[in-house]
């Protein structure tokens, strides 16, 4: 996908979704890639690495790259997607670390895409 500068949070959200779809088509099940990467890293480092940790580290790599090239927008978009995967794996990681009980977490009520975008824009307005 070409380097694109999105101009609204909705554009960024849509672009991230498209990137994720393309990555899935190119590399197979993306969640499985995090699990496989964690397994390989566990062998290399001789300790258990969780997919959550992989997602966090990959997000840090992308954030590090943006320090040198903030205009390379794909790094920002990839970091957003890595953070979404970190969120996906966070509960299991917290349970395995003994930070929370294994009781199921009450899932947030689904919100429309517009409600999510509006909430994001409202938070963005607070800092700009």
Image (cartoon, rainbow, N blue to C red):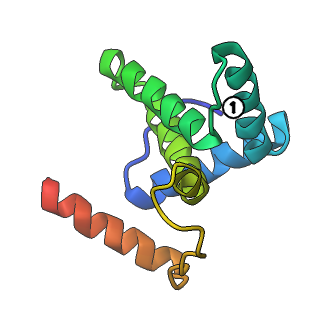
Position of the N terminus by quadrant: top right
Vertical relation: 26 (above or below) 68? below
Residue 74 seen in the figure: no
Horizontal and vertical percent position of residue 110: 55, 82
Horizontal and vertical percent position of residue 117: 41, 69
Q: How many labels does the image show?
A: 1
Q: Residue at x 53, y 67 (%)?
A: 101
Question: How many C-alpha atoms fall within 10 Å of the one at disc 1: few (<14), some, or many (≥20)?
Answer: many
Q: Observer-nearest residue: 90 or 65? A: 90
- Secondary structure at badge 1 equals helix
Can you identify the residue that label 1 sits on?
38
Q: Residue at x 33, y 15 (%)?
A: 68
Q: Which residue is drawn at 43% across and 29% down?
A: 60
Q: Which residue is drawn at 37% across and 49% down?
A: 7
Please tell me in which quadrant of the rendered image residue 26 appears: top right
Horizontal and vertical percent position of residue 4: 50, 36
Q: Which residue lies furthest to the bottom in this view?
A: 109
Horizontal and vertical percent position of residue 34: 70, 38
Residue 72 seen in the figure: yes
Q: Observer-nearest residue: 60 or 19? A: 60
Vertical relation: 39 (above or below) 11? above
Vertical relation: 50 (above or below) 61? below
């Amino acid at each position: 996908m070409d380097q694109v500068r999105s101009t609204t949070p909705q554009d960024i959200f849509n672009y991230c979704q498209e990137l994720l779809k393309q990555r899935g088509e190119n590399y197979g099940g993306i969640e499985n890639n995090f699990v496989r990467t964690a397994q390989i890293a566990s062998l290399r480092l001789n300790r258990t690495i969780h997919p959550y940790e992989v997602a966090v580290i990959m997000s840090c790599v992308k954030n590090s790259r943006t320090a040198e090239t903030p205009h390379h927008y794909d790094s920002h978009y990839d970091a957003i997607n890595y953070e979404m995967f970190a969120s996906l794996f966070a509960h299991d990681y917290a349970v395995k670390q003994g930070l929370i009980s294994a009781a199921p977490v009450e899932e947030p009520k689904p919100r429309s895409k517009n409600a999510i975008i509006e909430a994001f824009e409202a938070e963005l307005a607070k800092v700009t």
